[in-house]
Image (cartoon, rainbow, N blue to C red):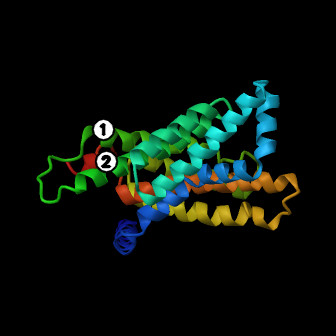
Amino acid sequence: VCVCVYMSECECVCFLRVTKQYLPHVARLFLISTFLEDGIRMWFQWSEQRDYIEATWSCGYFLATGFVLLNLIGQIGGCVLVLSRNLVQYACFGLFGIIALQVCASVLLNLALGGGLLLLLAESRSEGKSMFAGVPSMGQSSPKQYMQLGGRVLLVLMFMTLLHFDSSFFSILQNMVGTALIVLVAVGLKTKLAALTLVLWLLAINVYFNAFWTVPSYKPMHDFLKYDFFQTTSVIGGLLLVVALGPGGVSVDEKKKDW
């Protein structure tokens, strides 16, 4: 068993060395995919979104239009800034504001997406410090450590939205394996290996079960599968950032170095 664990860790290290330059870019794209898809959907379904907000919240035509417009600009603009790596911290705060606006719609998912943005903030802080090459460092800054901890814990909430509570054997197996791996990520034990395994697991499940492109767009199932697909993609993006950044100072892996 020890030999298998050692080999798995070595394979994980080799993977990280090969993908070190590309992994953060892929992670950012996956993580913001929910915001990007929502913004694009608001562009193409402008009148439907406005009418839905107006009817649901009884806020009137102008307030509903302003809400949809603010979400459209805020989400697409924030995603462009994150992907271009310009003003990432301001983009994250802007997307936090979008989450606050949408909190009435889905409290759990929006908190979880906030966890992903915390990981993005932690990455941007680490990039800012790396600009001063050659300057001695006393270790990770406390804010970054707790951003990573908060992001990991909130990823658990995001993962909980993917659980399917039915009696089929595969669903039970999927829930058990996924829950065990996400708990390891949350506490920071074998973090990179657990996160990478969960990424591969979720990628396979997402493409197989949430293939919304195989369902005609006029059927309701198309929108349900599309929602689940991008929701799962955001979880994968957050986990890829955990693989790229590591668990941070507040984790079992970090404490084991002192033992």
| Residue 76 in view here | yes
Residue at mark 1 to residue at mark 2: CA–CA distance = 9 Å
State the image coordinates of residue 84 (x, y, percent, origin top left): 45, 59
Q: Which residue is mark 2?
A: 125
**Based on the displayed image, in which of its 4 quarters is residue 73 positioned?**
top right
Q: How far from the left and from the top, in percent, is residue 127?
A: 30, 54
Q: Is residue 239 visible?
A: no
Determine contact: label 1, label 2, CB under 8 Å: yes
Q: Horizontally, is 187 left or right of 77 in the view?
A: left
Secondary structure category for the residue under label 2: helix
Q: Nearer the viewer, residue 53 or 215?
A: 53
In this picture, is 235 found above or below 10? above
* Residue 188 at x, y percent in the picture: 38, 48
The answer to whether 221 appears left or right of 240 in the picture is right
Q: Which mark is residue 135?
A: none
Q: Residue at 59% across / 60% down in the picture?
A: 202
